[in-house]
Amino acid sequence: DTGVSQNPRHKITKRGQNVTFRCDPISEHNRLYWYRQTLGQGPEFLTYFQNEAQLEKSRLLSDRFSAERPKGSFSTLEIQRTEQGDSAMYLCASSEDSGRAHGELFFGEGSRLTVL
Amino acid sequence: AQRVTQPEKLLSVFKGAPVELKCNYSYSGSPELFWYVQYSRQRLQLLLRHISRESIKGFTADLNKGETSFHLKKPFAQEEDSAMYYCALSRQGAQKLVFGQGTRLTINP
């Protein structure tokens, strides 16, 4: 297992187009997270899955954003009608189930989105 | 709402000197606190967490609830410590991590 895998690594799109990012977590991890990071800032939480259930979702995630984890394995993050403000690094992370405690996050290398 | 503040965006020290990266938080409950690190061309990774009370790569961090701080310290900096460091907080039972803006640490030879 090479860790959390994200693709594409880079995506350049025009304003108004839709984009989709994929995340493959570490195989035995049932928790999966999406974060967004803009230049000079720390990662911002977007959403969290326990297996296939989306249990937490940030208010940052407008109705143009949707995330799925259909079989509790890989996840997709789709952004519809992209805006220039969506330009950021989208980070995926996974962790083991550690009960109520927050487990160690294992991050992917990220998918960088540039909206022209 | 929870907030994490790292007052220094940049910190530069000489090799062998002590290092302290500051982290202050605002949260009225009992937080879980973490330090994550990103070395050049590597992924973001966990450095340490307050509940473990361990020293990793010579770094320690003590949770001070009175001062709402979780500063990261190392007595003798090494060149390989140069990296971006993020302090992060979660509420107990929640899976959302709130990150600070990060501090870029540079260790000069």
Image: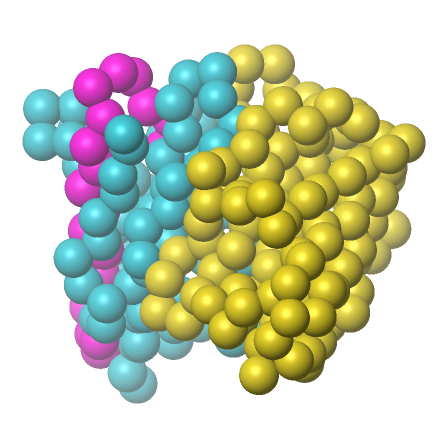
- The residue shown at (80%, 27%) is A52
Q: Is residue B83 left or right of residue B28?
A: right
Residue B63 x, y percent position in the rendering: 24, 30
Q: What hue represents chain B?
A: cyan
- Within the magenta stretch, is there residue B1? no
Can residue B55 be seen here? The reply is no
B71 or B13, nearer to the observer:
B71
Residue B105 x, y percent position in the rendering: 31, 70
Can residue B84 be seen here? The reply is yes
Height in image: A18 above or below A92? below
Residue A62 x, y percent position in the rendering: 53, 45
- The residue shown at (72%, 54%) is A78
A102 or A79, nearer to the observer:
A79
Chain in yellow in the render = A
Colour option used? by chain
Q: Is residue B42 left or right of residue B24?
A: right
The extreme right residue here reads A71
- The residue shown at (23%, 67%) is B9
Q: Magenta region: which residues?
A: B12-33
Height in image: B78 above or below A4? below
B79 or A9, nearer to the observer:
A9
